[in-house]
Amino acid sequence: MDYVKKGAWSPEEDKKLIDYITKYRIWNWSQMPKFAGLSRSGKSCRLRWVNYLRPDLKRGPFSLEETQTIIRMYQSLGNRWSAIAKEIPGRTDNEIKNFYHTHLKKHLGGTKVNNVQVKPKSRSKKVEKAKQIEMGQKKPLLTTCPIKDPNDQSLDFTKSSSSNYITFDENYGISDFLETSDQENNVTSVVNQVHDENIVILESNPDSTSPSNIDLYVKDFMNVISHSSNVDFWLELYMATDNLRG
DNA sequence: AACCGTTCCAACCGCAAACGG
DNA sequence: CCCGTTTGCGGTTGGAACGGT
């Protein structure tokens, strides 16, 4: 039985594999290692190539669009990672599976309160901070709000009379402030305030319950948060606003 | 600085499907 | 169809990196 190396690949091994496949293409994974001068199993070579060395891999953090695709497909297909990967060019099944387990599972596995996905922990601190904003003790920067209404008229959020908030803070996550009466009255929350990089308020807005308006609000909102480098930041918001999308 | 718990992901394993003689 | 070999898939894990004390 020949010695078969395991563990992390060295740059020299990577180069041997790349050089061999470039020259002779992939013809038989189990036979190829000995011709390529590698003390590896064919299985290990295949995995290294498919998940890491292939030239068409994208790398880097997942975009919001990619994440949306993964969530949507996971909800319809379940853990069929290779099928999901086929819909996302440049991403491997292994990468998507890891991304799901490290970023998505905790959000998808959360509880729903008033039909809003929330994190179960640190609620008291989140509520306290949200109330401080609501009571004017912490003043958000309303003038920098980047979101416009669907009719292209600037919205004057300073005159808002709503007291029902969902807040998000990078330290504390999401808390929801929706009253149950909102749900009973079929009032849908929409995103209409982005105060600064750290805090976002989703405000209950009875005037914006038509689906087209909500879609536009959420679309604009997603544009804003997708530029954040903190994946968990926009991902948690995305999950929390799940009920706002059709 | 040292320690410890957590996060993340590359790479592993076992099993199933596909292939081909 | 059978059976050995190869390929592909999904669950799991080892250990590096990171963050907090």
Image (cartoon, coloured by chain):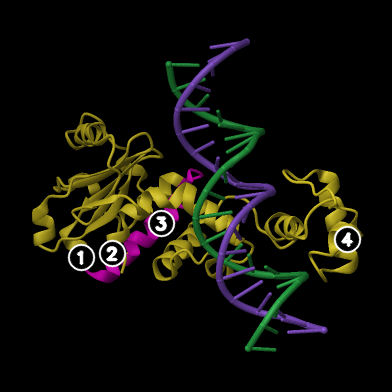
Chain colours: A yellow, B purple, C green
Asked if residue A192 is among those painted magenta in the image, a careful observer would answer no
Instruction: Name the subunit of mark 3.
Output: A
User: Do the residues under discs 1 and 2 have CB atoms within 8 angstroms?
Assistant: yes
Numbered badge on residue A222? 3
- Asked whether, in this view, residue A53 is left or right of residue A3, the answer is left
Residue holding disc 2? A214
- Asked whether, in this view, residue A204 is left or right of residue A55, the answer is left
Please give the name of the residue rendered at 43% of the width and 52% of the height, measured from the top-left corner.
Answer: A104
Residue holding disc 4? A20
Mark-to-mark CA distance, 3 and 1 = 18 Å
Q: Is mark 3 on a helix, strand or loop?
A: helix
Q: What element carries label 4?
A: helix
Instruction: Pick whichever of labels 1 and 4 is earlier in the sequence.
Output: 4
Q: What element carries label 2?
A: helix
Q: Main secondary structure of the magenta part?
A: helix
- The image shows residue A49, relative to residue A193, as above or below, that is below
Q: Are marks 2 and 3 on the same chain?
A: yes
Please give the name of the residue rendered at 25% of the width and 32% of the height, measured from the top-left corner.
Answer: A129
- The image shows residue A41, relative to residue A159, as above or below, that is below
Mark-to-mark CA distance, 1 and 2 = 6 Å
Residue holding disc 1? A209
Displayed quadrant of residue C14: top right
Answer whether residue A56 is visible to the viewer in this image: yes
Mark-to-mark CA distance, 4 and 3 = 44 Å
| Residue in front for this viewpoint, A214 or A160 | A214
Which stretch did the figure color magenta? A210-231
Numbered badge on residue A36? none
Instruction: Pick whichever of labels 4 and 3 is earlier in the sequence.
Output: 4
